[in-house]
Amino acid sequence: MLATPYRNVLNPNIGAGAGSIHDQETATKLGFRGGTVAGSNHMDVFAPLAAEVFGKEWWETGSLSLYFRNATIDREPVSARMKVPARRRDVQADVWMNRDDGMLVCEGTMGAGSPGEPTALQRLDLATIDGSANRILKHLHAGDLIRETGVIYGATQQESRLEIITEPLDWYSGESPWGGRVVTPAGYVGVLYAQAIATLRRSIGSAVGLFGAIEIRNLHGPLLVDTPYRVSGKVLAVGQSPKTEFFWFETYADDPDGKRIADHRMLLRFMKASSPLWAES
């Protein structure tokens, strides 16, 4: 097994205000111990393991696929873990993250090349999910398209990320083998989630959301800072759990010539207790 040192991952949005699960007051009202650290921030902690096991190949054809099991709060120590694969190419391995008391934060897979098997999130059967009783997400349906949007992850965004990151790899701040600065794993989510999800916000309303699972995959990567991409996608499934409504979706980042550089799969949850549509239940 490989493991990173324990890292105190920050929640930079602890005072974000009502509507954000990262906000201290909002999160505690919903039963959390405090404002939660975004799951995407935890993804940056896995990058040194990707570099050690797969090298630059991970940034070209690698994936990181995580299902989040328990939320952490600001600066709680966490360590990323990896079961060492037998080879370094065309393989994927089990990965997970523990808090310093052993609590499981997330689990999934990380790989590079063509492993010949689905990732942790790709292997889930989404076809059986039923969203017919949804209230918050009643206007969303499997197959709904996320319209194409132009996205640039700029230097200012990268610098903001580097101010809080616990694993500042050289390629994030200087030249890389691909000629520019590489977007961090958490930044991938910024490219492939933030702009795209804005196109669905009118259907969602004001309910408080949180990441349930995230996968990023480099197809002809990596994503680079200050580089234009076209991001589009689709809804895969819509459903609910006892405390949340949720939907799965995918987004794709293409360069100006139409080459697919990376893609992304996410489970996005919305707390029923935060929505007036569930207030009477």
Image (tube, helix red, strand yellow):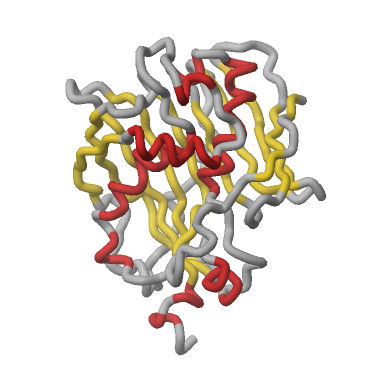
Q: Is residue 2 left or right of residue 208?
A: right
Q: Specify the quadrant that holds the N terminus.
A: top right
Quarter of the image holding residue 79? top right
**Residue reaching furthest to the right:** 101
At 62% from the left edge and 73% from the top edge, which residue is drawn? 31
Q: Residue 175: x and y, percent?
A: 41, 15
User: Is 19 located above or below residue 82 in the figure?
Assistant: below
The count of marks equals 0
Q: Residue 158: x and y, percent?
A: 41, 35
Q: Is residue 150 left or right of residue 248?
A: left
At 63% from the left edge and 16% from the top edge, which residue is drawn? 53
At 56% from the left edge and 13% from the top edge, which residue is drawn? 55
Q: Is residue 45 left or right of residue 4?
A: left
Given residues 10 and 148, the one toward you in this image is 10
Q: Residue 199: x and y, percent?
A: 24, 54
At 49% from the left edge and 58% from the top edge, which residue is drawn? 210
Quarter of the image holding residue 82? top right
Q: Residue 19: x and y, percent?
A: 43, 69
